[in-house]
Image (cartoon, rainbow, N blue to C red):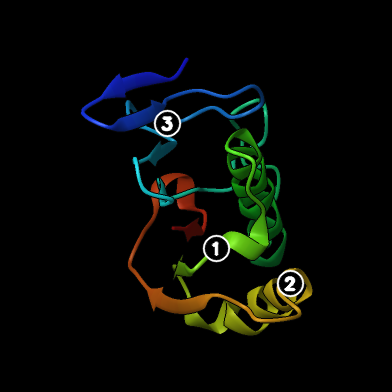
Amino acid sequence: MPAKQKNLTCVTELPGLTPLANYSLLRTTTNPLVFLSGQIPLNSKGEIESQEPSKQMVQCMKNVKTILKEVNLDFTDIVKIVVYLENMDDFPKVNAEYNKLFTKNPPVRTCIAVRTLPKNGILFK
């Protein structure tokens, strides 16, 4: 599963996570930094279960939690999150779910509206 490349550990698959393309889910460096690929709300079958953006956000964060667990980290270790929405009108509902996860010392966050996303979901990076 993990492959070493010049002081990088790359993980391209984890149980329960199905990437859409050939990319690393996470990369760790020799210093204490971990970089995650963007996450769309795919369940363990590789499908989007809900079209409701707040539920999609919850699924994205479940995926992030699975990836972080692989390197013994959790949400308190996240420094920055970028959220991509297809419709900024969805922000209040997505934000409400986000606030349930990060109740104390939340990470820096940017939220951007874009025209379209893979599988018409939201994207967390």
Residue 17: % across, % down: 59, 29
Can residue 47 be seen here? The reply is yes
Q: Residue at x 68, y 61 (%)?
A: 52
Q: Which amino acid does label 2 sit on?
A: Glu
Q: Residue at x 65, y 81 (%)?
A: 105
Q: Residue reaching furthest top?
A: 1
Pick the front one: 22 or 42:
22
Q: What residue type is labelled 1?
A: Ile
- For label 1, the residue is 78
Q: Distance between the residues labelled 1 and 2?
A: 16 Å
Residue 22: % across, % down: 32, 25
The secondary element bearing badge 2 is classed as helix
- For label 2, the residue is 97
Q: Residue at x 65, y 25 (%)?
A: 45
Asked whether the beta carbons under mark 1 and mark 2 sit within 8 Å of each other, the answer is: no
Q: Residue reaching furthest front?
A: 31
Q: Distance between the residues labelled 3 and 1?
A: 23 Å
| Numbered mark located on residue 89 in the image | none
Q: Along the polypeptide, which appears first: circle 2 or circle 3?
A: 3
**Would you call the spot at circle 3 few (<14 residues within 10 Å), some (14-19), or many (20 or more)?**
few
Q: Along the polypeptide, which appears first: circle 1 or circle 2?
A: 1
Q: Distance between the residues labelled 2 and 3?
A: 25 Å
Q: Along the polypeptide, which appears first: circle 3 or circle 1?
A: 3
Is residue 13 placed above or below 113 in the rendered structure?
A: above
- For label 3, the residue is 20
Residue 32: % across, % down: 43, 50
Pick the front one: 105 or 112:
105
Comparing labels 3 and 1, the label whose residue is closer to the camera: 1
Can residue 51 be seen here? The reply is no
The secondary element bearing badge 1 is classed as loop
Is residue 115 placed above or below 16 in the rendered structure?
A: below
**Would you call the spot at circle 1 few (<14 residues within 10 Å), some (14-19), or many (20 or more)?**
some
